[in-house]
Amino acid sequence: MFSRYALVGIAATAVHYCMLMGMVELWGANPAPAAAVGAGSGALAAYIGNRRVTFASQAAHRRVLPRFLVVAAVGALLSGTIVWTGTTLLSLPYLIPQLLATALVLGGGFALNRQWTFA
């Protein structure tokens, strides 16, 4: 199950990073809010993939979607905070803290989605 979750996560992360890098590199956006927007976009892709592929859930959207959005919001806030800390306080290039954020959100998100969202 984790391998399916990881594959869905790779696709969702691609959406996330495309948004993040596009906003920063093409539009000159601040990396921290761009990371949060990217995470939100990736979350939508992740919901669709996890509902259909990872957990094959038949549960009502009205029950599962709000839970998924809570998990995604926590992940987006965590991601934005880590990127802000890394870029603002530590003066790192934005992709370094974003990679750390991605790893933390992947592990935590899987556990929460398996035990609560799609349970």
Image (cartoon, rainbow, N blue to C red):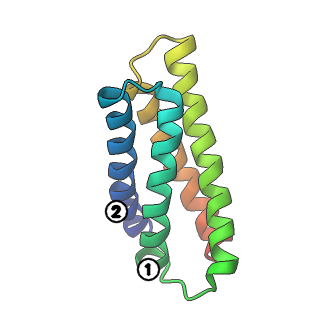
Q: Is residue 67 above or below residue 72?
A: below
**SS label for mark 1:** helix
Q: Residue at x 34, y 62 (%)?
A: 7
Q: Nearer the viewer, residue 65 or 107?
A: 65
Residue 47 place in picture, x, y as percent: 50, 67
Within 10 Å of disc 2 (Cα), the crowding (few <14, some 14-19, many 20+) is some
Residue where numbered disc 1 is placed:
52
Quarter where residue 22 is shown: top left
Q: Residue 4 is drawn in which quadrant?
A: bottom left
Q: Which residue is mark 2?
A: 7
Three-letter amino acid code of the residue under disc 1: Arg
Instruction: Give the image location of residue 29, x and y in percent.
Output: 43, 27
Reply above or below: 45 against 16.
below
Q: CA distance from mark 2 to mark 1?
A: 13 Å
Residue in view at x 70 percent, y 78 percent: 63
Q: Quadrant of residue 113?
A: bottom right
Quarter containing the N terminus: bottom left
For the C terminus, which image quadrant? Answer: bottom right
Q: Which mark is residue 9?
A: none
- The residue type indicated by label 2 comes to Leu
Residue 39 vs 83, above or below: the answer is below
Q: Say whether disc 2 or disc 1 marks the residue closer to the N-terminus.
A: 2
